[in-house]
Amino acid sequence: MANIRRIVIFGATGNTGLCCTEAAVELGYDTTVFVRDPAKLPEPLASQVSVKVGDVLNESQVDDAVQGQDAVVIVIGTRNDLSPTTMMSEGTKNVLSAMEKYNVNRVSACLSSFNFWEREKVPERFLNILDDHTRMLEALKASNREWVAVLPPHITDEPAKGDYVTAEGKGPGRTISKHDLGHFLVKCFTDDGNLYKMIGLCDKPQA
């Protein structure tokens, strides 16, 4: 198991990103966040992390954030913009390139669970985002890094339940709390059994 003490989170001010940052701090990691707008980091969280301001499409800024880390979390997204994009995949490629340059091995990335679906069954409005998430997944698989692809279903604002279900492949449920998702994106680093897998997770089904 890798010795991980320092992590950097890309996309740390999104809904899931903030939960991921909170989890990293609570789990005792020396946490760096890479953000466009540091004002979106609430207190006291902002005072508990190191902040790197930049654009994931800027290679030198990404390099600066990755250097000296032990692991990386990629939780970048377009919020509610479903138009065609290459931002997420190009940003992921920049992160992976920086990781190779500075010998940072372990990375988790949050991707669409539609990657588990047959394309013709995916609602058309989500296809543009799925296309870029697919390119992200291809970049992870083509890299020589120790990657974990985390593919959640619908993400809710519900409080953390802590007993969520994970499985290689599509999970047995339709929702996951953003807090539990953020926690797993960090926690998954500590189990080598997660490496090189597409992992689905969901709220524990009710008995």
Image (cartoon, grey):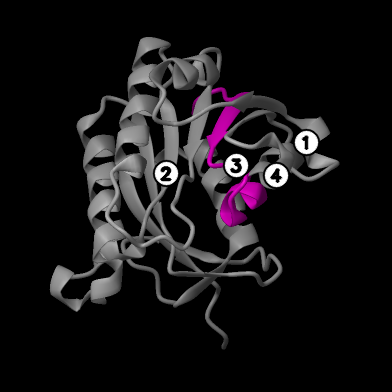
Q: Which amino acid type is shown beneath numbered disc 2?
A: Ala
**Vertical relation: 66 (above or below) 167:** above
Position of 104 relative to 92 (above/below): above
Q: Nearer the viewer, mark 1 or mark 2?
A: 1
Residue linked to disc 3: 12
Q: Nearer the viewer, mark 3 or mark 2?
A: 3
Element type at mark 1: helix
Q: Which numbered tag is attached to residue 40?
A: 4
Q: Which residues are magenta?
A: 1-20
Q: Which mark is residue 64?
A: none
Q: Nearer the viewer, residue 39 or 100?
A: 39
Q: Residue tagged by mark 2?
A: 109
Q: Earlier in the sequence, mark 1 or mark 3?
A: 3
Amino acid type assigned to the residue bearing label 4 in the image: Lys
Most extreme residue toward the right is 44
Could you say which quadrant of the image residue 108 lies in? top left
Q: Can you tell which mark lies on residue 46?
A: 1
Residue closer to the observer: 58 or 12? 58
